[in-house]
Image: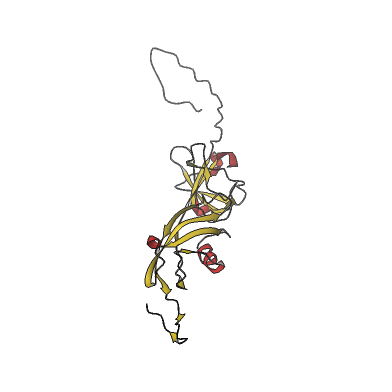
């Protein structure tokens, strides 16, 4: 510390110099991203802050500890630390200098992965009247639903029925998607899933043969 200009006629002020060390401050990284089925998070989803409002832009990418949305003991979404910070590059904003800070470590990182919005819709069904209002999902139906998910996640089961438990012949019938099970390695908790009805299904009438042995078309 250099001598200043303090003076007082009532005192004899002697200046004694001293050396002081300014130790580096600690950086803190925070980030947010919607679940995408991968452990990779891009720098654009994160920010780094220092002291006195200093901030640093983040580029590159890093790996999460887990790809999944994380919950605390109260079933609330919480953050996770990065698995590594090697792939990140920090650039000071408004003159902020990295030389004033210790290197960023995973211990000072907090990233929150939020649930991915998802709407699953009941399949459009075209069948001949069989007296049943329920419907057994096909492999194609499951594939169509699973294609709406990310990271190889799949819909493994679903319950579907015609609205009002109505098995009768008709067109533009409503089909309800009553439930769906998602396999994502997190009990389906990586998605904020809503179930939607379809409105264009059809049940055709069943052809029958009369006692006179002539083929008689059914009537819708």
Residue farthest to the front, as pictured: 211
Going 51% across and 59% down the picture, which residue do you hit? Answer: 158
Tell me if I can see residue 148 in this picture.
yes
Relative to 121, does residue 114 appear above or below in the rendering?
above
Going 39% across and 12% down the picture, which residue do you hit? Answer: 10
Residue closest to the eye, 151 or 27: 151
Q: Quadrant of the C terminus?
A: bottom left
Residue 85 position within the rendered picture, expressed as x and y whole percent measured from the top left:
60, 47
Q: Specify whether 123 is left or right of 101.
A: left
Residue farthest to the bottom, as pictured: 214
Residue closest to the eye, 69 or 136: 136
Tell me if I can see residue 97 in this picture.
no
Residue 28 position within the rendered picture, expressed as x and y whole percent measured from the top left:
52, 40
Relative to 54, does residue 44 appear above or below in the rendering?
below
Residue closest to the eye, 44 or 80: 80
The image quarter containing residue 177 is bottom left
Going 59% across and 51% down the picture, which residue do you hit? Answer: 185
Going 56% across and 35% down the picture, which residue do you hit? Answer: 24
The type of colouring in the image is: secondary structure
The image quarter containing residue 8 is top left
């Amino acid at each position: 510390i250099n001598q200043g200009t303090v003076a007082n006629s009532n005192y004899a002020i002697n200046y004694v110099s001293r050396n002081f060390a300014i130790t580096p401050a600690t950086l803190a990284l925070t980030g947010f991203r919607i679940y995408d089925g991968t452990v990779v998070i891009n720098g654009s989803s994160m920010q780094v802050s220092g002291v006195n409002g200093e901030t640093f832009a983040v580029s590159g990418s890093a790996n999460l500890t887990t790809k999944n949305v994380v919950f605390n003991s109260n079933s609330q979404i919480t953050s996770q630390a990065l698995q590594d910070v090697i792939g990140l590059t920090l650039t000071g904003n408004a003159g902020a200098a990295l030389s004033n800070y210790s290197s960023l470590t995973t211990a000072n990182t907090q990233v929150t992965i939020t649930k991915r919005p998802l709407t699953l819709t009941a399949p459009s069904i075209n069948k001949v009247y069989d007296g049943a209002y329920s419907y057994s999902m096909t492999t194609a139906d499951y594939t169509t639903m699973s294609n709406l998910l990310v990271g190889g996640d799949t819909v493994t089961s679903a319950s579907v029925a015609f609205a009002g438990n109505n098995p009768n012949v008709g067109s533009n019938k409503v089909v309800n998607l009553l439930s769906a099970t998602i396999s994502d390695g997190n009990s389906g908790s990586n998605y904020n899933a809503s179930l939607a009805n379809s409105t264009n299904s059809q049940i055709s009438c069943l052809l029958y043969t009369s006692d006179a042995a002539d083929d008689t078309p059914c009537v819708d």
